[in-house]
Image (cartoon, helix red, strand yellow):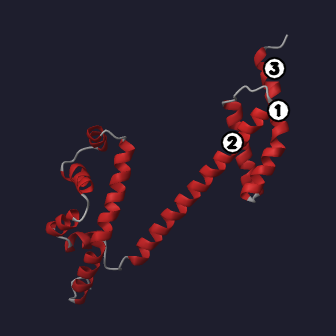
Amino acid sequence: MRSQEEAANESSVSWGAEEWRGLYARALFLVQDHDVAEDLVQETMLRAIVASPHCEDATKRRAWLVAVLRNLFIDRCRARRAMARAEREVSSMETSATPAATTVDVLDVLSACDLEEACRTLCKPDGELLKQVYFQQRSHKEVAADAGVKTATVGTRLFRVKGRLRRVLQPLVESRVATQAGRGWFA
C-alpha cells in the first residue's frame, strides 16, 4: 500500500507537468528569452513544490502559480534596475573624479571646519544621524533602537545622507584640488 506522501508527490508531478507549458508561455511573453523564461518557470515550480498551497481546485492553483511567476519576474526586473543604477553611479564617479583626487588628497584638502559647514547644510535628523554613527561611534543597532526603526533603515538613511554630503563637498574638493594642482602640490 502506498503512503500518502507518495500519492501527494505523484499528484504534484502530474499537475506540475500540466502547468509547465502555460507558465513557460507566460514567462516567455514577459522576458522574450527562452533561457530566462525557463529559469523563471523552474523557480516558480520549485516554490510551488516547497510551499504548495495544497489546492485541489486547478483554477486556484493556476492563479497562485501565475502570481508567483509574476512576482519573480518583478523581483528580477527590480534587481536588474538596481544593478544598472549602481553601475551608472560607479561609472559616473569614475569619470567625474579628477586624476589627482585620491582619498588621501581629499582628506588633505578638507578641514574640520569644511566638514562641519557641510553638515550644517543637511537637515537636523541627517546631521544627528552622522554625529551619532561617526562621531559618537554608536552602532547602527543602537541608533535604530533609540529611533524606533529597523537597523536596515538606519543603514539606508546613512547611505543617503553620505551621498548628500558627498554632493555638497564635491565642488569644494574639486576646486581645492585644482587650485593645489595649479600650484604644483600634486604634480
Q: CA distance from mark 1 to mark 3?
A: 12 Å
Is 99 or 137 nearer to us in this picture? 137
Q: Amino acid at mark 3?
A: Ala
Q: Amino acid at mark 2?
A: Ala
* Location of residue 159 in the rendering, given as x and y in whole percent from the top left corner: 36, 56
Classed neighbour count for the residue bearing mark 3: other residues with Cα under 10 Å, few (<14), some (14–19), many (≥20): few
Figure quadrant of the C terminus: bottom left
On the image, numbered disc 3 is attached to which residue? Answer: 7
- Which of disc 2 and disc 3 is earlier in sequence? 3
Is 145 or 80 nearer to us in this picture? 145
Q: CA distance from mark 3 to mark 2?
A: 26 Å
**Res 101 → quadrant:** bottom left
Q: Amino acid at mark 1?
A: Trp
- Which of disc 2 and disc 1 is earlier in sequence? 1
**Res 143 → quadrant:** top left
On the image, numbered disc 1 is attached to which residue? Answer: 15
On the image, numbered disc 2 is attached to which residue? Answer: 67
From the viewer's perspective, is residue 178 above or below residue 54? below
Decide if residue 135 is on the left or right side of residue 52.
Answer: left
Numbered disc in front, either 1 or 2: 2
Residue at 38% from the left image edge and 51% from the top image edge: 156
